[in-house]
Image (cartoon, grey):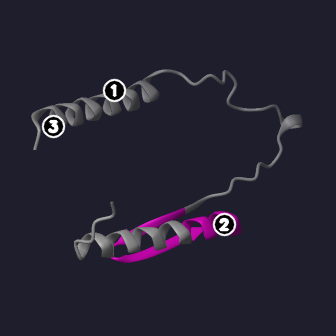
Amino acid sequence: MKPILIFLGIILMFIGFFMITLGMILPSSQENYEKPETEKTESSVEYSGIVMIGPIPIVFGNSPGLMILSVLIAILMIIWMFLFAFGIRIK
């Protein structure tokens, strides 16, 4: 492997750790975290995720659109794993 790629990988990891640390240390742009009682409204948060345990995907979420996207991503990940396992190269 080329030494320059190893060096760039290490530099990228340090930049990532530095950005995460800055995100925890620096205050948020919001000054008031709590809204007054008259302005409180329920917000709709949608989420979805994939947990891969070996070749078995576990998909979870509360939004149908995001769930379909997560299933498509899981299928692509499984196809990629099989291509990688059998040594098929895409050119």
Alpha-carbon span between mark 1 and mark 3: 18 Å
Spot occupied by residue 10 in the image (x, y as percentages of width and height)? 20, 34
The reply to whether the magenta stretch includes residue 62 is: yes
Residue 84 location, quadrant = bottom left
Q: Is residue 54 visible?
A: no
Q: Residue at x 15, y 37 (%)?
A: 6
| Nearest to N terminus: mark 1 or mark 3 | 3
Residue drawn at (75%, 53%), measured in percent from left and top?
A: 44
* Figure quadrant of residue 4: top left
Which residue is denoted by mark 1 in the rendering? 18
Compute the Cα span from label 3 to label 2.
40 Å
Residue of label 2: 62
Q: Residues within 10 Å of mark 1 (few under 14, many from 20)?
A: few
Q: Position of residue 36 (x, y in %)?
A: 82, 31
Residues drawn in magenta: 49-70
Q: Nearer the viewer, residue 78 or 52?
A: 78
